[in-house]
Amino acid sequence: MDERYTTYSIVCTDTLIKTGIIDYLSDVPDPSQGVPAAELALRFGLDSRKLVHILRCYAANGWARETRDYSFALNRCSRTFIKGHAGLGLGVSYVCTV
């Protein structure tokens, strides 16, 4: 992705970590289905339209996937940011190669 969007990507990742959305997505019963952005927004008290943009940026950078319109799930790379995993200490500069 273009260098001018790097800061936005970092902020998106930081937002998802600090709000607890990544931890929440890691605990869903069927992760292959993903969780609708509207459900995440309601649970965490966020604007769903803004959250969709954040999650899509996160997915565009290879850290998550959009399972269907407006529903998102973690992928293997993003699991490094789950609380208690060693990857969280690496920070947002961690690069995943799939």
Image (spheres, rainbow, N blue to C red):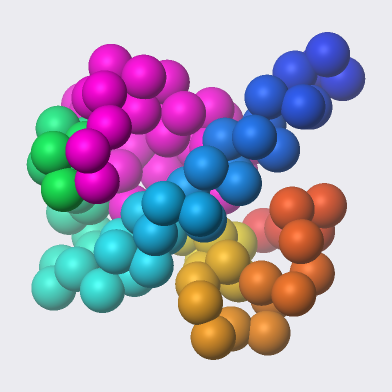
Q: Residue at x 36, y 54 (%)?
A: 21
Asked where in the image residue 11 lies, by quadrant, the reply is top right
Camera sees residue 5 = yes
The quadrant of the rendering that contains the C terminus is bottom right
The location of residue 75, given as percent across then percent down, is 46, 59
Give the residues in magenta. 44-73
Determine whether 21 is above or below 69 in the image. Answer: below
Camera sees residue 36 = no
Is 88 on the left or on the right of 15, as rendered? Answer: right
The location of residue 46, given as percent across then percent down, is 27, 32
- Along the line of sight, which residue is nearer the eye, 63 or 27? 27
Is 42 on the left or on the right of 71, as rendered? Answer: left
Is 29 on the left or on the right of 58, as rendered? Answer: left
In this view, which residue lies farthest toward the front? 45
Task: Tell me if residue 20 is in the magenta stretch.
Answer: no
Q: Residue at x 19, y 68 (%)?
A: 28
- Along the line of sight, which residue is nearer the eye, 25 or 59? 25
Determine whether 47 is above or below 98 in the image. Answer: above
